[in-house]
Amino acid sequence: MIDVVFVPQRKISEDTCVLIDVLRATSVIVTALANGAVRVKPVLTVQQALKQKDADVLICGERKSVKPKGFDLGNSPLEYSKRAVEGKNIVLTTTNGTRAIGKIKCKRLYAASFLNLSAVVRKLELHDRVTIVCAGQKGRVALEDVLCAGAIVSMSRAERKTDSALMAESVWKSVGSIFKALSECQHGKELIEKGFSKDVEFCSKIDLYHLVPVFKDGAFSLDE
């Protein structure tokens, strides 16, 4: 069975979960690990992040979409090049994605985006029950996350789909251009207004990477 949670309002306790924050936390996590980062550790606050600064640690993330003072990198996946992150441990704090993680209690948690869509679908074939958790935007449903969830549902071989999964799948099937949809959604518009149009374009790309980050010992890595 496959289920979709549009906004994590309560604790989610399932065996296998997938976190989606297309704009931009999970896109950053996927990109960072693809370019050689060792781990990506999510934390809730800017203060918690800054306290973990070290030679091999990059402090990264955003508040109101921009990089906080004292941070090494913001929340743009385009910043996470091989040169910038290879061999580094990353501490990440964001407005929506890292907060959503705190509401998920499960045995296995994967990070998904359009950038690693097919790899996630293949990984989920190993599990009978899956809950996809959309991070949302400021406590409300975010179209970009629902679209990605719907793509996963549509591509999966799940015989049973909850109503919310069917709704997400329907939204996905109604969209022609991912980039257009992301550009027109609320968060996408906000990012474009702040100069991050290239991020929106990048985050709309499908299958740039063929890896699935897994959450283990408090951080995302490629080891399961």
Image: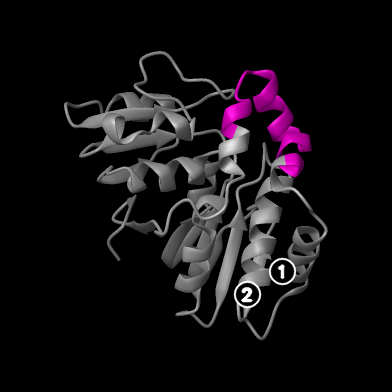
Residue 186 is covered by the magenta coloring: yes
* Residue 42 position (above or below residue 199): below
What residue is shown with label 1?
A: 165
* Residue 80 position (above or below residue 149): above
Residue projecting furthest to the bottom: 159
> Magenta-highlighted stretch: main secondary structure?
helix
> Magenta stretch?
180-199
Disc 2, SS: strand
Q: Is residue 141 visible?
A: no
Image quadrant in which you'd find residue 187: top right
Image quadrant in which you'd find residue 200: top right
What residue is shown with label 2?
A: 2
Q: Residues within 10 Å of mark 1 (few under 14, many from 20)?
A: many
What is the three-letter code of the residue carrying label 1?
A: Ala
Image position, residue 34 (x, y; %): 35, 48
- Dot placed on the residue nearer the N-terminal end, 1 or 2: 2
Q: Quadrant of the N terminus?
A: bottom right
Q: Is residue 92 visible?
A: yes
Between marks 1 and 2, how big is the CA–CA gap? 7 Å
